[in-house]
Amino acid sequence: MSSSRAQPVFEPISRDLTDPVYPDNPSKSSIENNRPIRGDLEAIQPENFDPRVPYGWGFFIYRAVFGDGTDARFAEGLNRLEKWLRWEARDSRYNSDDEAARWEEYPDYMPAPGEPDVTNEVAARMWNEVVEEYPDAQEMITEPEGSEDFSPIGRDFAARVESFNINTGPQYEEDRRRNMRYETCLIIDGRVLEMLEGLPADTPPVVPLPIFSPESEQVAQILRDNWVWILDRETAIDREEGDVQEFPPWIRIRLRSLRFLFFESALGYVTTDWQSLVEEDKKNWDTMRWWSTLARTSNEIRRASRAASSNTMVLF
C-alpha cells in the first residue's frame, strides 16, 4: 500500500516561529506571541506527534472518481483544492476571526502584504497523501444523494494506518490530542470534483480587508459553499464490526473547516466522538450531513422544531 506522492522533508519548527522576540519592541513581541496561528505550529512541533511526517500537517485524500478523462480532471481539482487551503492559511494573517480584530487594533504591527509571515510557514507545511488505487474501489456507491457508501475507502484507510505501526492516539490517558492525518481521511468523488473544478484557478491577493466588505464575503463564501467528504477511521471500523450508529462514518466538511479541524484536534480541543460532530442539514436533514463542533446542540434544536411543527400540523 502506498500513496502517489513523494513525501517532503520539513525542517524542524524553531523557537523563533513559536515564540518570536523583538528586543527593541516588547509590544510587538507580546502581540506576535499571542497570535493563535503560532499555537498551530506548537501543536506539530514535537517530532513524536507524527514520526512519519514530522513537522507537517495534512490529510490522506482518496480518489473516488474513475473513468475516461478523469485522471487530468482529478489532478487539476486536487491542485485547486490545495491552492485554496494554502491561501486560507496565509490569508488568516489579516482576515480570520482570530486575527482581524488584532490587526485592526494594532495596525503598526501588521505585516505588509507580501512580507514573510508565520502564516506562510503553516501553509507551506501542508502535505496531503493521495491514494488513487485501493481494493474494491469499484464497489463504492457515490449517488444518489444520501445513498453513498465509501466502505472500501474506510477499510483501506484503517488497514493503511494499522500498517504504519505508530501510536496514532494520545500519549497518555487524559490527553485528547489527535493527529487527523490518521484519524480521518478526505474523499473526492464526482460531485466534489465538479465543485473543485469550479473553484477560481487563481486565489486573491493576501491583503487586509474590512470584515464585512464585498471582497471578504466573496472569498468567505467560496470556502463556506465548497466541501469534500470526510471519513472517520474509528467509526468506519465500528461499522464493519456491526455496530449500530446514528450517522455514517462519511459526511461533508466545508473547506473553511479543514485547517481548524486538524489543529484544534492536534491541540485536544475537538471531541473524539464522531457522532457528536455530525450535523443534520437544515433542509435535507435525512440525506445530507455536515461536520460541525456544534452538531449535537444544532440537531437537538432542529429536531425539537420539526417535532413541534409536525404536532401543529396534526392539530389542524
Image (tube, rainbow, N blue to C red):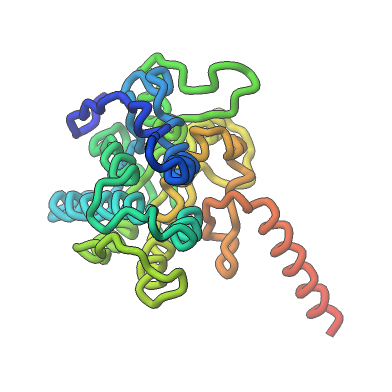
Residue drawn at 18 percent across, 54 percent down? 76
Does 235 appear above or below 218?
above
Q: Examine the rendering and report whether any part of residue 93 can be seen.
A: yes
In the rendered picture of this protein, how many numbered marks are placed on residues?
Answer: 0
Question: Measured from the top left, where is residue 171 in percent x and y?
Answer: 54, 17
| Quadrant holding the C terminus | bottom right
Would you identify the image quadrant in which residue 91 lies? bottom left
| Viewer-side residue, 301 vs 94 | 94
Residue drawn at 46 percent across, 60 percent down? 100
Q: Examine the rendering and report whether any part of residue 151 can be seen.
A: no
Residue drawn at 34 percent across, 46 percent down? 119
Q: Which residue is at the far top?
A: 165
Question: Measured from the top left, where is residue 124 in percent x and y?
Answer: 26, 40
Does 228 appear above or below 50?
below
Does 26 appear above or below 70?
above
Question: Measured from the top left, where is residue 281 in percent x and y?
Answer: 57, 63
Would you identify the image quadrant in which residue 69 lies? bottom left
Residue drawn at 25 percent across, 28 percent down? 10
Question: Measured from the top left, where is residue 231 in percent x and y?
Answer: 45, 41
